[in-house]
Amino acid sequence: MQNMGSMLDTAVDAPEVREYDVDAVNRKETRPPLYAPRKKIHPRRTHGFFRSFKWWVMALTLGVYYITPWLRWDRGPGAPDQAVLVDIPGRRFYFFFIEIWPQEFYYIAGLLIMAGLGLFLVTSVVGRAWCGYTCPQTVWTDLFIWVERLVEGDRAARIRLDKAPASASKAAKRLTKYVIWLLIAMGTGGAWVFYFADAPTLFTDLFTGQADTVAYATVGVLTFTTFSLGGLMREQVCTYMCPWPRIQAAMMDEESLTVTYRTDRGEPRKPFEKNADWDQRGDCIDCKACVVVCPMGIDIRDGQQLECITCALCIDACDDVMSKIGRPRGLIDYDSIANDERRRAGEETKLRLFRPRTLFYFGLWGLIGLGMLYVLLTRADLDINVIHDRNPLYTTLSDGSLRNGYTFKILNKAREQRTLMLHASGLHGIKLKVVGSEDMGDSPDPYFTVKPDRLQSFRLLVTVPPGTLKDDAADLRFVLKEINTGQTASYNSLFRGPGQ
Amino acid sequence: MSERHTDDFTGVETTGHEWDGIRELDNPLPRWWQWIFWACVVWSIGYWIVYPAWPLVSGYTKGMFGYSSRGEVAKEIAKAETGMEGQLEQIRQASLEQIRTNANLREFALAGGRSAFAVNCSQCHGSGAQGFKGYPNLNDDEWIWGGTIDAIAYTITHGIRNTEDEDARQSDMPAFGRDGILEKAQINDVAEYVLSMSGQSSDASAAARGKPLFTDNCAACHGENGGGSHEFGAPALNNDLWLYGGDKATIVETISKSRRGVMPAWGKHLDDATVKQLAIYVHSLGGGK
């Protein structure tokens, strides 16, 4: 018995009994927890270039968001005078001088593709700049933290308040903070609905209880999401909910600039000592200024991390410390992995903005942009769509002539009534007849009058004499011409028959 | 049970799976994730109480407010019908010609007629009114009982050879073969003559023998030249449009056994406004006179 446990999986004295050197997989002490409680983050205020830049970006983005629906743009009588308006019941999208019909949704698709490629481009050049500066989640969280700081004080005061026992003043501070957050959240939700209706009218309607239930519901939902995501959830949204941090790694490479702690300069880190020999130690004095300002609760000195939104506030915090201790700024700075390697190899660092990846993203982005611009500048305000009847494909008449039916749609995107003449070519002896317009008689080229800003649908019958159609189908071209201006729109269709 | 594996860099256990050398860390989920799960459970219970949810042996739980998606549709249809009432009343008051010449009423009637046609008529006449054997094509310009808007409305209202309406359009072609009126050879000759009338190739001598037979037996209804007659519902035979088929075998069959197509009297099944809209629609298909 005395040698028991000294060897692995050894047979003990008792016959056919072995002992095993293992740990229970689910032993209580070593089992990792299924759920982790959230640890609260209290970011400290910073000053510096990037903090100022972020304030400006916030002012700009929020300004654009809140003010845009109130801008006016005169489009003449009968048309809305709101510069940017998504008119869903009227099925129009107005953007200053541009007016888009549902048929032209490709403009929106193009813009979304451009936005996506733009995001790829920015990410490949400067990493998660979108996350750090312009993402609504970041902007509103920044705003909410600013409010929190105004009401409850900076980091130390907030930690003290969190730990303080319940009191009237603590409740008052909390209540004030939540009320201001709620007002901001309601303003955010409120501004959103103004994009979908006449803003001044809807504004009065909202406060007098006259607005549509959908408007109130939208404001309610967006108030809730703004309050909870921006005020309460904050960094949890970026770390756990947002898919973008997972995708972006595909756009970055070793030359992409990102917020980086320069290990070569900082290490070995040591607490600050007066008259230190800086050649014998790293520049990092381990003051953790970079950690306390981080809204994501990470230590940038651990290297690139999933949580880091590259808001660059740690750069400001560190630069401030470096200038105070008389060391060069930029211990934490925008830098690339390639530069880190170059430094280690004793080479010059360099900024390579023009790389195949960035050029490709920019080229694609630019091409689509130019294509969209071309389509927009050459956009016609007159268009036709001709749909050949599916059933029957053709009708034989008693005298042997053949007739095809078409649904003919005219899109008059101008804000005036227009008179148009239709002409069809491709076969001999074509006769056109518009159903419901017997008054036109047997004119070979019927006239249409279409109302302003309307899509009008007609049924068109095309007849050709017996024997005209040799095969089972022939090309038929419709040309619609405006009488006054001579502007045309055309459509290539088919004329069908039984064949031989 | 896979082997326990701990990631060297983070010290976090992995899930044990591996894809191309990439392992997934088994980090704990945030606690609020679990709250959301429970919130969803609570929400679903509320949902069961408010909305129809659980199937029972007969029927289902109805929910507190009696909501049903079918009920919603019924409400929307009722609302749409109320909205149409004004125009339907105008259609009831107006004559067919007035409807046809008034742009707004015509547009309304065409839309209503199209949907009524799809529901009531397309089963026999086809979704494009192109017809089938025995069911006329309504797109062409040959009409058995007349192609004016009033004639079309009459046919729709009273139907053809039905027993439900006394005013139904009536006519009865004799079964020349079955009833022994004509000999087989004579029927063959008449068929050859009909072929020649419609411009198809035919046996000239047989057609010549058939001509007097046609004059004696057929011309009273179909006309001396085979032009047909709306009064007797006798189709024109001098063109290439055929209700049952224009080949010789079919023509012989038609002469021998007769044809007797029936159409219901839609006036007994549909309201006046719907019949009027149907007439406007059918007339607009292209062959209307």
Image: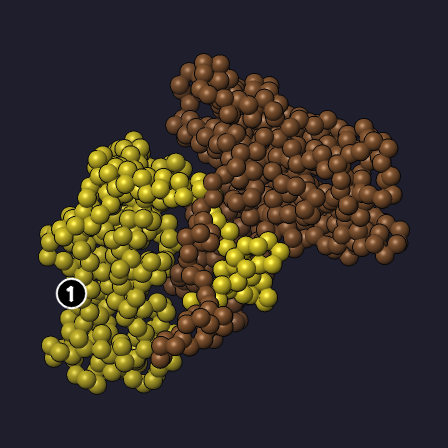
State which chain is coloured brown: A
Q: Residue at x 83, y 54 (%)?
A: A344
Q: Position of residue B17 (x, y in %)?
A: 51, 64
Which residue occupies the foreground of this view, A145 or A476? A145
Q: How is the image coloured?
A: by chain
Residue B36 seen in the figure: yes
Which residue occupies the foreground of this view, A337 or A464? A337
Which chain is mark 1 on?
Answer: B
Q: Position of residue B233 (x, y in %)?
A: 23, 60
**Color of chain B here?**
yellow
Q: Quadrant of residue B193?
A: bottom left
Left or right placement of residue B232 versus residue A472 in this view: left
Q: Residue at x 86, y 33 (%)?
A: A275
Residue A479 seen in the figure: no
**Which secondary structure, mark 1?**
loop
**Residue projecting furthest to the front:** A2
Left or right placement of residue A179 versus residue B217 in this view: right
Q: Residue at x 32, y 85 (%)?
A: B205
10 Å neighbourhood of mark 1: few (<14), some, or many (≥20)?
few
Q: Position of residue A451 (x, y in %)?
A: 52, 35
Q: Position of residue B129 (x, y in %)?
A: 33, 58
Q: How many marks?
A: 1
Which amino acid, mark 1?
Asp
- The residue indicated by pointer 1 is B172
Q: Residue at x 61, y 44 (%)?
A: A307
